[in-house]
Amino acid sequence: MLLCVFFTVSGCINPPERQPTELHLQLPQTWRVSVDFDQLADQSWVASFGDPVLSKLVDEALTDNFDLRSTAARVEAAIAQARIDGSGLWPQLSFAPGYQYSQIRSAGFGSAQFSVFEALFNLSWEIDVWGRIRDFRQAAAEEAEAAHFDYQAAQLSLAARIAQNYFALQEAVLQTHVATRSVADRSVIADLVQGRFDRGLARGLDVRLALTDLANAKSQQVQAENRVQLVTRQLETLLGRYPDGSLSSILEISGQPGTVVAALPAAGNDRTLPEPPQALAAGLPSELLTRRPDLIAAFTRLRAADARLQSTQKLLLPRITLTAAGGTRDTALTEMIDPRAVAWNVFAGMAQPLFTGGRIRGNIHLNAARVEEALNRYQSVALNAFREVEQALAAEEWLREQEQALREAVRQTEASQELALYAYRHGFIQILTLLDSYRSTFNAQSAHLAVKRQLLNNRINLYLALGGSV
């Protein structure tokens, strides 16, 4: 009768059958923002940019980045811990050979010497009738699997940071080109105004304004050059290299295998950042829950918490153990191989906890709270993932409109700059109007480069949010 009660109680302790899509929020059938993309091909998103240098840098970072190596070590540690936690399913056997030498002295009787050899073994085995140890092992296995998905998420995040820093480095160098061109243009204006002043055609104030504008342009050039070295060192650190600033903004693969060397972009008016690739499909919101690695990791940890709670609840049930001990002792080593000298005993017992001072109940409440924590953590990670996708999809449209507007602004300011220079030479406009036209050109060119990099960053963020493969 008692065993029937035990089996009934054990049968009631089952973890909930959870599904990744069971969230405390209503998922839409499609994303709120509809963007016209082609279907996603079975290639990595890094390769979709069609840049061999970017692919080379990502491969290098995935091999040499120290944070990623640390994450990989945590995966190995989780696997080892799973093996440790699952060892209780097997009998634990130990063997202890020994040797003892004794000498006894007695007054009037001389001394006696003897040696004793012994070979003892002990065996203990908890028979996992209720599945408590199996649940404990399952929780550890789920934790190891979650650590593996953490590693995949870290790979994806690292590849995204490499790509974003790579394009940031390209933009930084292009910004220095724009600033250098601006300094050259302002120098021409300063010389022009100085010449007009020498001929009595301009005021001293005009010269001061032109020289002030030139100094500001030089300051912007220095700031752009400093930005190059900052982004360069950040990228080198992500690659696992010493941050000596030797990596340039636009890179080329050298003739030697595994080597990347620096090369500045060629001069010309067509310096610009690449367009984002078009091979992308956002899929359905529900598909994100089974594709994005950090979401899978959070859900797997929820299942691990369920299994650990189940294992803790089964501590209330009796534990059945099998123990055995035996061995032999003899003064002669040769006699120990005689099987008739071996003594051993076997004991099977059952232990039912009656009073533990609240320790078992406390552990149950602790693990129940951890289940609730893991559940809400999964909900939070999922909600944040949906926000990232919706945000990136919405930003795609706005950034494209902004890029088109700034492209037109660049075209108009470059044209107005030529007209303003002509007008100033012939005395039609004041120096402030001329300087303002050149500042407008610089600002439009700089803003256009910045928004093109934002487009690339947003596309990378979208790949990251959707959990695409590296």
Image: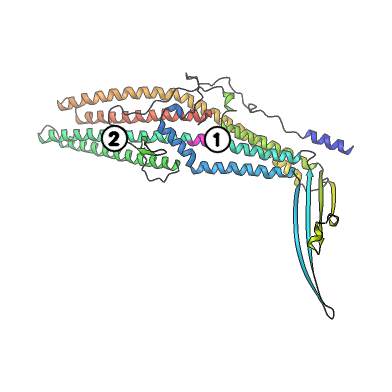
Residue 441, image x, y percentages: 28, 28
Q: Is residue 368 visible?
A: no
Q: Quadrant of residue 136?
A: top right
Q: Report the Cα–Cα distance between label 1 and label 2.
A: 40 Å
Q: Quadrant of residue 193?
A: top left
Q: Which residue is at 19% across, 38% downward?
A: 208
Residue 120, image x, y percentages: 78, 56
Q: Quadrant of residue 343?
A: bottom right
Q: Judge from the rendering whether residue 203 lies leftward or rightward of residue 31; answer left or right.
A: left
- Residues rendered magenta in the picture: 152-158
Q: Judge from the rendering whether residue 359 lies leftward or rightward of residue 36; answer left or right.
A: right
Give the main secondary structure of the magenta stretch.
Answer: helix
| Residue 53 drawn in magenta | no
* In the foreground, 140 or 371: 140
Classify mark 1: residues with Cα within 10 Å, few (<14), some (14-19) or many (20+): many
Type of the residue with mark 1: Gln
The outermost residue toward the bottom is: 108
Question: Circle 1 sits on which residue?
Answer: 152
The disc label shown at residue 179, or none: 2
